[in-house]
């Protein structure tokens, strides 16, 4: 196992939400490099670039925290892109969203999301949720190609 | 003799003779005599002249004797008459026997006709004619016949005249009787003849009149019926030509009677329908049966008339068609049909609109849940971050304000939650099943125990199963129990009673508390959205809970009411359809 820092990609169009997520990641003391993308298109381009590099496993994120309501290319479309690309498929994707709509939950799991987490209202709950997510998907559930 | 019976004058006699049968007899005899004269061509002129002169002589002598007779000298009249006749007959024989024939024939016939009954007169006339013919034919072949033949003829004729004259004198002794017989004979004959003729004419005329009257009346009656009929009546011949039609046809189709008579029926048939639709008159006549059907006719103005008809063969070889205009009925039926279709269309459209509206409402509530909640969460999140990172620097008043921000954000979040529940209670379809209420109530009390803090005392009675949507009914119980706990929280010993009464097909549940209660004057405001009877500082709440309960209960076909008094607690009653027996829930 190579000693490379874990990478978490946060995709959220709202600056405030992205900042809160970063704060939560910080509060949760997650030991990882954090990347933030504002649009789905940007994220898809970035991920394709990673996949085409000589060592994709070195540059691909270890966890993607994906918001659903993104402009132009929606969170669901980003998720679909990731799951359709054989090289990106192993990357865990956790949906982090405000939607409590049951149809959205269904859609996300149908397209291959690893988890669907509704953003908790109270900030301490939010920090706790981020902590749990990272602990499981970054450490307990290491993917095979690592 | 009747008093008023005047003796006829000579002119009157002639008139009588002219008018009666005797005239005809005389004519017939004259024709025979004429034929006899014609048969002797060499003597025509002489004979004609002689006959005329003799005739005039004889008629004059008759007139004279008639006058004498009329004056009462019967015998003298008879003598004169016979003598004149004898002379008439005798004188010509000196010159020509034929003249004798002519005169004797005329005399004989005249006397015979006047005196004898008709039959005898005919016999005498024919006999006289035969003798004359025989004599003439003899005479023409051998002009120089022995005198004795002429003499015998003359004697015969004279004897005849004498006999006839003696009839007057000997047989009819009384002049009055002769006159009476004479007059009566003529009158009777004339009257009988005229009577018979008049009667037969009258009878014929009356028969004709009667028949005509009957025929006229029948025709009038038929025409009246025909023309006043409410239906169109057409008489069509074998080839489909219109023979007769009534007023109604003109009124219906706009053509005048003259325009249609003699034209083909196809003129008024709707050209879009071929004639195969129409039973041909010839077929009806051959099959000798009535045909019923429907048809479209074309009026003069181009409009279409829908008709029902019955066509029957007539004895005269035509077809009678009785046609009823059902256009109005058809149009009314069509209008109703169109109206129904329009209504269905409208219902479909409105259903679609409603569905669309529901869909939009759902997406609206989705947007609300996401777009309103997210900024609120961020406000709350950043407030927490400030408190966490800069808590030390914000001691005192700033910290109090920060807490206010957080509290309001949380309150707003609950409000949004309740609104979303209310929206979900309104839309969507009910997933009804049989529900046992007790486990639901128990679970809610257990789940909320920690949240409520201090335990109220619950008294739960028997709760019969109902038919309903489990998730919505859970929301009902949640709201009601939560309310009861909330409003009784400031009482020393809060007690909450839950129970039910089965009333036929419905079950009435109630939730009773001994809390703050409410003024019954405002009971009707209790179930309105955002209506609160207590201040937020007194009891927290969004004012949506009971509105949500009401909407769910109404959607199940139930009813909701509240009973309470200020400071003495409140009871909320609601009804739901009872579970059907065979579907009763397993406890």
Image (tube, rainbow, N blue to C red):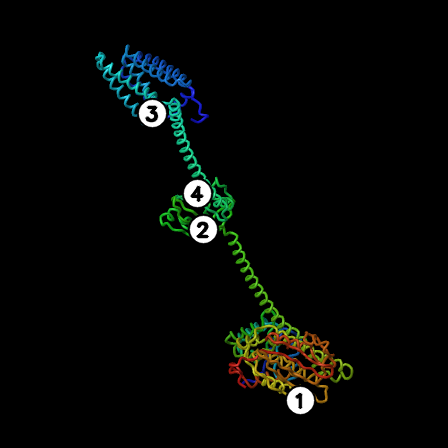
Q: CA distance from mark 4 to mark 2?
A: 15 Å
Q: Chain of mark 2?
A: B
Does A15 appear above or below B318? below
Q: Is residue B521 visible?
A: yes
Does A8 appear above or below B196? below
Query: Which numbered disc, 2 or 3, marks the residue closer to the eye?
Result: 3
Q: Are marks 3 and 1 in contact (CB under 8 Å)?
A: no
Q: Earlier in the sequence, mark 1 or mark 2?
A: 2
Q: Earlier in the sequence, mark 4 or mark 2?
A: 4
Q: Mark 3 = which residue?
A: B116
Q: Where is the N terminus of chain B found, in terms of image quarters?
A: top left
Q: CA distance from mark 2 to mark 3?
A: 76 Å
Query: Which numbered disc, 4 or 1, marks the residue closer to the eye?
Result: 4
Q: Residues within 10 Å of mark 2 (few under 14, many from 20)?
A: some
Q: Is residue A25 visible?
A: no
Q: Earlier in the sequence, mark 3 or mark 4?
A: 3
Q: Which mark is residue A44?
A: none
Q: CA distance from mark 1 to mark 2?
A: 86 Å
Observer-nearest residue: A35 or B140?
B140
In-image side of B228 versus A99 (left or right): left
Observer-nearest residue: B190 or B71?
B71
Same subunit, tags 4 and 2:
yes
In-image side of B77 versus A65 (left or right): left
Q: Chain of mark 1?
A: B
Q: Which mark is residue B242?
A: 4
Image quadrant in which you'd find residue B429: bottom right
Q: Considering the numbered disc 4 on the image, is that residue within a helix, a strand or a loop?
A: strand
Q: Mark 2 = which residue?
A: B309
């Amino acid at each position: 196992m190579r000693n490379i820092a874990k990478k978490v990609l946060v995709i959220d169009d709202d600056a405030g939400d992205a900042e809160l997520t970063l704060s939560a990641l910080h509060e949760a003391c997650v030991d990882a490099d954090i990347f933030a993308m504002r649009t789905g298109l940007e994220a898809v381009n970035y991920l394709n670039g990673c996949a085409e590099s000589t060592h994709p496993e070195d540059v691909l994120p270890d966890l993607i925290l994906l918001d659903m309501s993104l402009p132009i290319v929606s969170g669901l479309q980003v998720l679909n892109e990731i799951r359709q690309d054989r090289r990106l498929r192993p990357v865990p994707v956790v949906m982090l969203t405000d939607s409590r709509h049951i149809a959205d939950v269904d859609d996300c799991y149908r397209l291959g999301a690893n988890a669907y987490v509704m953003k908790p209202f109270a900030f301490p709950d939010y920090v706790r949720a981020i902590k749990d997510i990272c602990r499981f998907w970054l450490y307990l559930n290491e993917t095979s190609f690592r | 003799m009747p008093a008023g019976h005047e003796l006829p004058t000579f002119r009157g006699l002639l008139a009588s003779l002219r008018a009666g049968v005797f005239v005809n007899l005389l004519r017939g005899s004259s024709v025979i005599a004429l034929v006899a004269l014609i048969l002797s061509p060499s003597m025509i002129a002489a004979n004609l002249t002689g006959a005329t002169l003799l005739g005039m002589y004889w008629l004059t002598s008759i007139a004279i004797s008639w006058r004498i007779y009329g004056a009462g000298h019967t015998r003298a009249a008879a003598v004169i008459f016979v003598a004149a006749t004898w002379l008439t007959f005798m004188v010509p024989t000196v010159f020509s026997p034929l003249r004798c024939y002519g005169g004797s024939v005329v005399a004989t016939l005249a006397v015979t006709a006047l005196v004898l009954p008709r039959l005898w007169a005919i016999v005498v006339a024919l006999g006289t004619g035969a003798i004359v013919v025989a004599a003439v034919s003899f005479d023409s072949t051998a002009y120089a016949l022995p005198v004795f033949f002429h003499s015998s003829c003359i004697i015969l004729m004279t004897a005849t005249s004498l006999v006839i004259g003696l009839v007057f004198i000997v047989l009819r002794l009384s002049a009055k009787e002769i006159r009476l017989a004479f007059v009566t004979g003529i009158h009777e004959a004339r009257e009988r003849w005229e009577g018979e003729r008049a009667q037969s004419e009258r009878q014929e005329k009356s028969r004709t009149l009667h028949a005509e009257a009957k025929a006229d009346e029948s025709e009038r009656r038929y025409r009246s019926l025909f023309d006043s009929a409410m239906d169109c009546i057409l008489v069509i011949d074998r080839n489909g030509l219109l023979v007769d039609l009534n007023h109604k046809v003109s009124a219906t189709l706009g053509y005048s009677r003259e325009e249609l008579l003699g034209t083909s029926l196809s003129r008024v048939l709707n050209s879009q329908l071929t004639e195969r639709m129409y039973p041909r008159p010839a077929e009806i006549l051959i099959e000798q049966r009535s045909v019923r059907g429907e048809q479209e006719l074309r009026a003069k103005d181009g409009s279409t008339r829908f008709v029902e008809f019955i066509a029957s063969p007539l004895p005269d070889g035509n077809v009678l068609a009785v046609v009823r205009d059902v256009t109005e009925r058809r149009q009314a039926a069509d209008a109703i049909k169109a109206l129904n279709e329009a209504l269905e269309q409208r219902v479909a459209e409105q259903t679609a609109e409603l569905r669309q509206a529901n869909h939009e409402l759902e997406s609206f509530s989705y947007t609300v849940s996401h777009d309103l909640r997210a900024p609120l969460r961020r406000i709350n999140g950043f407030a927490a971050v400030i408190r966490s990172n800069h808590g030390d620097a914000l001691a005192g008043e700033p910290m109090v304000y920060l807490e206010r921000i957080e509290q309001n954000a949380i309150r707003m979040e609950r409000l949004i939650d309740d609104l979303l529940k209310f929206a979900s209670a309104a839309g969507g379809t009910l997933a009804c099943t049989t529900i046992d209420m007790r486990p639901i109530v128990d679970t809610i009390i257990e789940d909320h125990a920690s949240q409520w803090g201090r335990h109220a005392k619950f008294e739960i009675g028997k709760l019969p199963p109902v038919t309903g949507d489990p998730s919505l009914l859970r929301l009902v119980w949640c709201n009601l129990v939560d309310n009861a706990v909330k409003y009784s929280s400031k009482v020393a010993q809060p007690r909450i009673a839950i129970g039910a009464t089965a009333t036929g097909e419905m079950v009435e549940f109630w939730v009773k508390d001994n809390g703050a209660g409410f003024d019954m004057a405002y009971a009707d405001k209790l179930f309105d959205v955002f209506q609160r009877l207590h201040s937020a500082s007194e009891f927290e709440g969004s004012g949506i809970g009971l509105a949500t309960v009401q909407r769910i209960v109404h959607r199940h076909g139930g009813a909701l009411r509240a009973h309470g008094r200020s400071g003495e607690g409140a009871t909320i009653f609601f009804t739901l359809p009872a579970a059907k027996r065979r579907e009763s829930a397993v406890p």
